Image (cartoon, grey):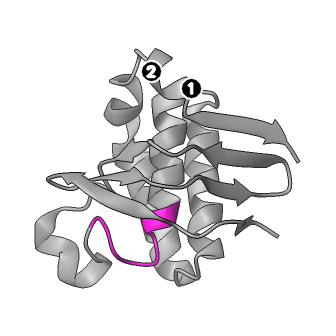
């Protein structure tokens, strides 16, 4: 069963940018994904007009899944489809309601291509992310 093995411990480092102050570890049936202290995330890309419906980029139950998704997109250690599926699993493990998790999954499938492609310089991020077989 997919789950986070550590709590999310973050500090604000800029407008809508948070930095891990302790490692964040997520595990599913195939991988253990560790984001190390110092990894910076800009939150989930949610239009501000929809925050009352889908929540703000930080502070909801989906924040931990957002960190994992951001790390996977930035490092490109998986293809985009796998990154998005792991995000969906992580959302469910954070007890995001299934309908909301599904909507968020389809949103990243529909709109995430440019975000995935713009991060072609991945060298600085790979030192902050470790993926191991489970």
Query: In the rendered structure, does residue 26 fall within the stretch colored magenta?
Result: no
Residue designated by label 1: 127
Position of 92 with respect to 66 (left or right) is right
Secondary structure under tag 2 reads: helix
User: Can residue 63 be seen from the camera position used here?
Assistant: yes
- What distance separates the C-alpha of mark 2 from that of mark 1? 6 Å
> Is the residue marked by circle 2 packed among few (<14), some (14-19), or many (20+) residues within 10 Å?
few
Dominant secondary-structure state across the stretch colored magenta: loop
Residue drawn where x is 52% and y is 69% of the image: 102
> Is the residue marked by circle 1 packed among few (<14), some (14-19), or many (20+) residues within 10 Å?
few
Position of 28 with respect to 58 (left or right) is right
Residue drawn where x is 40% and y is 15% of the image: 121
Query: In the rendered structure, does residue 60 fall within the stretch colored magenta?
Result: yes
Residue designated by label 2: 124
- Count of picture labels: 2
The answer to whether marks 2 and 1 mark residues whose Cβ atoms lie closer than 8 Å is yes
User: Where on the picture, by quarter, is residue 12?
Assistant: bottom left
Position of 92 with respect to 20 (left or right) is right
Residue 118 x, y percent position in the rendering: 33, 24
Position of 93 with respect to 113 (left or right) is right
Residue drawn where x is 29% and y is 49% of the image: 42
User: Can residue 105 be seen from the camera position used here?
Assistant: no
Q: Nearer the viewer, residue 131 or 73?
A: 131
Residue drawn where x is 79% and y is 46% of the image: 31
Residue 94 x, y percent position in the rendering: 58, 76
User: Where on the picture, by quarter, is residue 49?
Assistant: bottom left
Residue 60 x, y percent position in the rendering: 38, 78
Residue 13 x, y percent position in the rendering: 23, 50
Q: Which residues are magenta?
A: 57-64
Q: Nearer the viewer, residue 95 or 112?
A: 95
């Amino acid at each position: 069963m997919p789950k986070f093995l550590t709590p999310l411990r973050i500090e604000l480092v800029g407008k809508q940018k948070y930095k891990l102050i302790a490692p964040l570890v997520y595990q599913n049936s195939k991988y253990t994904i560790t984001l190390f202290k110092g990894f910076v995330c800009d939150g989930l890309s949610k239009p501000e007009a929809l925050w009352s419906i889908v929540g703000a980029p930080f502070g909801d139950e989906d924040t931990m899944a957002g960190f994992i998704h951001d790390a996977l997109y930035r490092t490109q250690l998986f293809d985009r489809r796998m990154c998005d599926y792991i995000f969906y699993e992580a959302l469910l493990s954070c007890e995001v309601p299934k309908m909301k998790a599904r909507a968020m999954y389809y949103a990243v499938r529909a709109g995430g291509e440019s975000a995935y492609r713009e991060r072609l310089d991945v060298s600085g991020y790979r030192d902050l992310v470790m993926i191991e077989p489970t």
